[in-house]
Amino acid sequence: MIVAGLVIETVPGAAPRVAARLLHEPGLALQGGDGDRRLAAVFTGADGAALEALAERLVRAHEDLLGVFPTYVADAGDGSGDPGPGGARS
């Protein structure tokens, strides 16, 4: 399972109406926005492919949505705290 922070970019002035349409999107929790063209959201899903599919679907379905940009992606894993091979360790 992954958790990803997203910036959702819209055409100018469209963020409030796009936010209203995204409120019931499974796996997506809106966190805020600038009131004009950007929304902040958190996505929780099975894997990176699910995030990619969500982004593609949203851009296709909403003509005033320009892009979905991940700002971070974390593997929620099994909760062991082990980031896996190549991951940072504290």
Image (tube, rainbow, N blue to C red):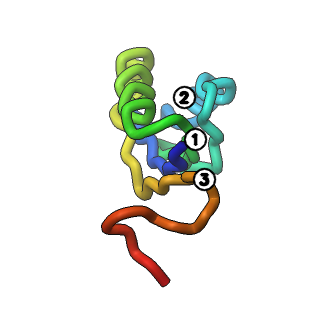
Residue at point 54%, 43% (across, down): 1
Residue behind mark 1: 44
Q: Are marks 3 and 1 in contact (CB under 8 Å)?
A: no
Q: Amino acid at mark 1?
A: Thr
Under tag 2, what secondary structure?
helix
Q: Amino acid at mark 2?
A: Val
Residue 50 percent location from the top left of the image? 44, 30
Q: Earlier in the sequence, mark 2 or mark 3?
A: 2
* Mark closer to the observer (2, 1): 1
Q: Residue furthest bottom?
A: 90
As displayed, is residue 75 above or below residue 8? below
Task: Give the camera-side residue of 64 and 69.
Answer: 69
* Mark closer to the observer (3, 1): 3
Under tag 1, what secondary structure?
strand
Q: Residues within 10 Å of mark 1 (few under 14, many from 20)?
A: many
Task: Give the camera-side residue of 23 and 73.
Answer: 73
Residue behind mark 2: 18
Residue 77 percent location from the top left of the image? 55, 52
Residue at point 34%, 64% (across, down): 85
* Mark closer to the observer (2, 3): 3
Residue at point 43%, 57% (across, down): 72
Residue 17 percent location from the top left of the image? 58, 27
Q: CA distance from mark 3 to mark 1?
A: 14 Å
Residue behind mark 3: 78
